[in-house]
Image: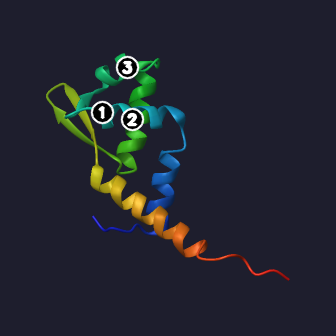
Amino acid sequence: MDDKLDSAALAGRLAALSHPARLRILTHLSRQNCCSCCKDVVSQLDLAQSTVSQHLKVLVDAGLVRLTPQGTRSFYEIDRAALGALSTSVSDLLTSCCAGPCPTE
């Protein structure tokens, strides 16, 4: 994956992060040494299984979480390279737009 994202990819990933439940899911996944199934995530959060599944789908579709089906179960893990690219893109955006003070009239 590129170190920088195009505008559409950046917007999509930021939108995926715009819900508190998805941030909590990412936090849970980041604390795991390996992947987690939806049931594991549900057990850690006060959310219904269907709600967690919907939020995981958004994160997978945005490319922030990888899905690995194994038989009847699905396992999820953070895509650390994707989060790194997101971090780089946001940092570059802040650096380029905030390089100095705005001119005064």
Which numbered circle lies on residue 44?
A: 3
- CA gap between label 1 and label 2 equals 6 Å
Residue 60: quadrant of the picture: top left
Q: Identify the residue under disc 2.
A: 27
Residue located at (38% from left, 47% from top): 61
Residue located at (60% from left, 71% from top): 98
Residue located at (35% from left, 51% from top): 63
Name the kind of residue labelled 1 in the image. Answer: Arg
Mark 3 or 1 closer to N-term?
Answer: 1
Name the image quarter holding the N terminus. Answer: bottom left
In depth, the one of 100 and 88 nearer the eye is 100
Q: Is residue 74 rendered to the left or right of residue 20?
A: left
Contact check, label 1 and label 2, Cβ < 8 Å = yes
Q: Position of residue 83 (x, y in %)?
A: 36, 53
Q: Position of residue 7 (x, y in %)?
A: 49, 67
Residue 36: quadrant of the picture: top left
Q: Position of residue 44 (x, y in %)?
A: 37, 20
Give the class, few, some or many, for how many residues have Cα within 10 Å of label 3's Cα (few <14, many ≥20). few
Q: Relative to residue 81, is residue 101 depicted above or below?
A: below
Instruction: Select label 3 or label 1 by which is in front.
Output: 1
Q: Identify the residue under disc 1.
A: 31
Q: Relative to residue 75, is residue 100 depicted above or below?
A: below
Q: Relative to residue 10, is residue 96 depicted above or below?
A: below
Name the kind of residue labelled 3 in the image. Answer: Gln
- CA gap between label 2 and label 3 equals 11 Å
Mark 2 or 3 closer to N-term?
Answer: 2
Give the class, few, some or many, for how many residues have Cα within 10 Å of label 1's Cα (few <14, many ≥20). few
